[in-house]
Image (tube, rainbow, N blue to C red):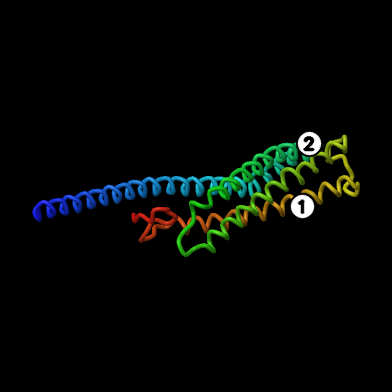
Amino acid sequence: MAFERSRSARAGNTETRSSGDQITAWRHDAGVSWTVVTTIIKTLRLLLLGLWLGAAVFFGAAVAPALFGVLHSTGLSNANELAGSIVTRLLATINTSGFAVSLFLLMTAYFSARVGNRVAVFAEMISAAIMIIMCGVNHWVIAARMVALRAAMQLPIDQIARDDPRRVAFDSLHSYSVAVMGVAIVAGLIGFLIMARGSSPTRGPQAGSPLGVER
C-alpha cells in the first residue's frame, strides 16, 4: 500500500511539472508574439513620423520658396496666384497626412510604454496631440478660410492691393499657417526623438508585455 501511495505521489509530481512546463512554454510563445507585434508597431510609428517630418520640412524649406521664386522669374502677372494654388494643394496633403499620422501615434502610444518611463510616454502622447490640433486647425480652419478669401476676391491675388482688407486678412492667415505648421513640426520632432530613444534595446522583461516574458 505504501508503495502504491509513493507511485501515486511521484505521478502527481510529474503531472504537475508537465503542466508547469506547458504553461511556461505558452507564456514564452505568447511573449515572443507580443515582442514581434510591438517591434513592428514601433518601427511603423517611427517610419511614418519620420516620413511626415521629412516631407513637411522639405515642403516648407525648399518646395514652397522654390515654387514662388521660379514662377516670379517667369514674369507672369498672376505668379502668386498660380504658386498659391499649387502650394495650397500640397499643404492640404501635408496637413491631412500629419493629422492621420499623429492620430495613429496617439492610438498606438500603449506599445511604446516602458517600465519606469511613464513621463516619456506622456510627453510622446502630448506631442502627438499637439500635432493633431495643429494639423487639424491648419487644414480645416486656417487653410479653409484662406481659400474662402481667395474666392471672395474674384481676381488673382496679384491684382489685389496690399492694403485691401481681404489681402491683409489673407496675409495674416498665411503667417498663422506658417507658425502653426512650425509648431506641428517641432512637436513631431520631439515625439520622434522620444520614440527613437524608447526603441533602443533594453535588458530584462519585455517592455509593455502583459506576461512579463523576458527576451
Q: CA distance from mark 1 to mark 2?
A: 24 Å
Where's the C terminus, which quadrant?
bottom left
Would residue 171 be found to the left or right of residue 22 on screen?
right
**Residue in the foreground of this view, choosing between 115 and 153:** 115
Would you place residue 118 above or below residue 70 in this image?
A: below
Label 2 residue SS: loop
* The label number, if any, that marks residue 126 in the structure image: none
Residue 59 sits in quarter: top right
The picture places residue 160, in percent across and down from the top left corner, at 88, 42
**Residue in the foreground of this view, choosing between 1 and 189:** 1
Please tell me how many numbered marks the rendered image carries.
Answer: 2
Residue shown at 36% from the left, 61% from the top: 203
Residue shown at 29% from the left, 51% from the top: 24
- Badge 1 amino acid: Ser
Q: Which residue is mark 1?
A: 175
* The label number, if any, that marks residue 76 in the structure image: 2
Would residue 186 be found to the left or right of residue 47 on screen?
right
Of mark 1 and mark 2, the one earlier in the sequence is 2
Residue shown at 39% from the left, 57% from the top: 201
Q: Residues within 10 Å of mark 1 (few under 14, many from 20)?
A: few
The picture places residue 121, in percent across and down from the top left corner, at 53, 59
The picture places residue 107, in percent across and down from the top left corner, at 56, 48
Label 1 residue SS: helix
Which of the two marks, 1 or 2, is nearer to us in this view?
Answer: 1
Would residue 98 be found to the left or right of residue 26 on screen?
right
The picture places residue 118, in percent across and down from the top left corner, at 52, 62
Q: Residues within 10 Å of mark 2 (few under 14, many from 20)?
A: few
- Badge 2 amino acid: Leu
Q: Residue furthest top?
A: 154
Would residue 122 be found to the left or right of residue 24 on screen?
right
Circles 1, 2 touching at the beta carbon (< 8 Å): no
